Image (cartoon, grey):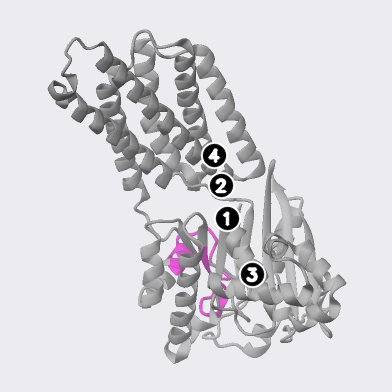
């Protein structure tokens, strides 16, 4: 479920505002679109307008980037009509602009990198504003120069005032465009959660989906003195086939798993970081800088290289292989730096919430959730709104019998809303809800094994039932929809 549902109203307001600003600008600027405008000026303006329209269509194709695309269309579609009627539109420039915007949109779609398209558009809008402003200023100077009145500057004060309003309108919709155009690095998903939050079982469920549905493969790096073999994906799957749970990480253990595949032609990827130490906190940029300096001294690698590559799993693997002793002593710092860079670079971030906290809601669970949501809201504040976030409640089978509830049924959605209403009693979660008005934030409830009975249901041997789950995912596909 999407936490905030106000975007439809926001989009309608944006469309109306975009059209209004565009019409005001075009109406006030008509005296400056001179009939003897040079052909290359017409070519450039036609190219700009067509490029924006074509790129806006590409933004709309990515659902989470559509608000900026809709506003872009609302602003520049009136330009096409007015330019065509006034003779300013050149077909060659328009076709070139459509091709250029179309190629960029195709590149963004093919690589699942709509953040690149958004970055290009924001820069191109600034160039358009500067070019248009210079053109209008030169046109005003030309009108003043050709005026028969020597005291034009005094008698033409109303024209100067109107011109200032004209430029103000231009800068207003350019400001709104740069604020609303946001793109997600949609192929890069990072899963983050505390120990015992269900990361490992969720990893195994997604590994199955990547391999069987997305033609995927994995990369993994494991640092452990005693658990190295047991932390490999194939061995964890084998343990589950034997009815055994995957082993817990030791304090000095670090395991990074990168799943990659393709949905159609679009690359998709998901990263899990599992470690045995305390739940990593305080993702402050200053703290990250301090740790990078410490790693610089320990590994004798320059800071720019560390900052550029710390989020790369191959770089971490090389650190482990080439600096074995130093790496073992700095596992916690390497983990912190890697997780920080994954937050910074990922386009979509999944926060895990342990379902045990809901079962124990009135016996310490609410306290744990208050701290956890406070931690997550701090992360969102630090790493910004040009990402999508999802809060995923694992182990839903702990408190609801899911064996007879279909994943896409009303009953399943009711469970999600019930947990959401419970979370809304927590102040730190309400803060995240408030953030959802500025960025896309979702919430899902899932279970890796929907056949397990909740703790509240009596059975002959409930402890054994809870001890040996299998991979029978319930609503994990909803995370897949969010991710891919």
Where residue 447 sits, quadrant-wise, is bottom right
Numbered disc 4: secondary structure: helix
Q: Do the residues labelled 1 and 2 touch (CB within 8 Å)?
A: yes
**Boundaries of the magenta span:** 390-416
Mark toward the viewer: 3 or 1: 3
- The residues tagged by marks 3 and 1 sit, at their Cα atoms, a distance apart of 14 Å
Label 4 close to label 2 by CB (< 8 Å): no
Front position in the image: 15 or 318:
318
Q: Earlier in the sequence, mark 4 or mark 1?
A: 4
Q: Point out the tag, 3 or 4, that comes first from the N-terminus.
A: 4
Proximity of marks 3 and 4: CB atoms separated by less than 8 Å = no
SS at mark 3? helix
Q: Which circle marks residue 461 in the picture?
A: none
Which label sits on residue 120? 4
Location of residue 448 in the rendering, given as x and y in whole percent from the top left corner = 64, 70
Looking at the picture, how far across and down is residue 134, in whole percent?
A: 39, 27
Please tell me which residue lies in front, 455 or 5.
5
Residue at mark 4 to residue at mark 2: CA–CA distance: 9 Å
Mark 3 = which residue? 339
**In screen coordinates, is 147 left or right of 433?**
left
Helix, strand, or loop for circle 1? loop
Q: Name the residue under label 2.
A: 115
Which numbered disc, 3 or 2, marks the residue that appears first in the sequence? Answer: 2
| Mark 3 or 1, nearer chain start | 3
Judge whether 245 appears above or below 261 on screen.
below
Disc 3/disc 4 C-alpha distance (Å):
28 Å
Return the residue at label 1. Answer: 347
């Amino acid at each position: 479920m999407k936490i905030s549902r106000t975007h439809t109203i926001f989009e309608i307001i944006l469309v109306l505002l975009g059209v209004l600003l565009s019409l005001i600008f075009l109406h006030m600027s008509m005296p400056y679109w001179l009939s003897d405008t040079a052909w290359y000026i017409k070519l450039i303006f036609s190219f700009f307008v067509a490029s924006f329209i074509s790129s806006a269509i590409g933004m709309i194709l990515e659902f989470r980037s559509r608000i900026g695309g809709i506003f872009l269309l609302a602003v520049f579609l009136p330009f096409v009509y007015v330019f065509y009627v006034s003779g300013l539109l050149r077909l060659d420039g328009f076709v070139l602009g459509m091709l250029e915007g179309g190629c960029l949109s195709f590149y963004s779609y093919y690589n699942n990198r709509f953040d690149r398209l958004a970055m290009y558009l924001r820069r191109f809008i600034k160039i358009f504003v500067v070019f248009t402003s210079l053109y209008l200023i030169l046109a005003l100077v030309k009108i003043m120069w050709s005026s028969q009145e020597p005291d034009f500057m005094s008698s033409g004060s109303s024209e100067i005032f109107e011109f200032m309003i004209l430029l103000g309108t231009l800068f207003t919709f350019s400001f709104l465009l740069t604020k609303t155009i946001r793109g997600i690095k949609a192929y890069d998903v990072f899963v983050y959660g505390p120990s015992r939050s269900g990361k490992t079982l969720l990893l195994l469920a997604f590994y199955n989906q990547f391999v069987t549905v997305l033609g995927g493969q994995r990369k993994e790096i494991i640092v452990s003195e005693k658990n190295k073999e047991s932390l490999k994906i194939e061995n964890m799957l084998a343990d589950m086939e034997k009815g055994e749970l995957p082993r817990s990480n030791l304090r000095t253990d670090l395991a990074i798993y990168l799943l990659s595949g393709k949905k159609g032609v679009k690359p998709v990827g998901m990263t899990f970081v599992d470690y045995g130490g305390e739940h990593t906190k305080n993702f402050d940029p200053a703290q990250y800088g301090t740790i990078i300096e410490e790693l610089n001294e320990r590994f004798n690698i320059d800071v720019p290289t560390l900052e550029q590559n710390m989020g790369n799993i191959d770089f971490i693997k090389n650190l482990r292989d080439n600096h074995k002793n130093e790496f073992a002593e700095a596992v916690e710092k390497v983990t912190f730096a890697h997780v920080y860079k994954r937050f910074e670079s990922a386009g979509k971030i999944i926060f895990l919430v342990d379902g045990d906290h809901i079962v124990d809601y009135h016996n310490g669970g609410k306290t744990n959730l208050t701290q956890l949501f406070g931690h997550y809201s701090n992360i969102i504040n630090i790493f910004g709104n040009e990402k999508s976030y999802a809060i995923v409640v694992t182990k839903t089978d702990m408190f609801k019998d899911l064996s007879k509830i279909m994943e896409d049924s009303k009953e399943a959605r009711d469970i999600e809303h019930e947990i959401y209403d419970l979370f809304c009693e927590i102040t730190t979660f309400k803060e995240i809800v408030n953030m959802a008005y500025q960025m896309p934030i979702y919430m899902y409830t899932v279970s890796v094994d929907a056949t397990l009975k909740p703790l509240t249901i009596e059975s002959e041997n409930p402890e054994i039932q809870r001890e040996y789950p299998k991979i029978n995912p319930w609503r994990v596909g909803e995370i897949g929809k969010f991710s891919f």
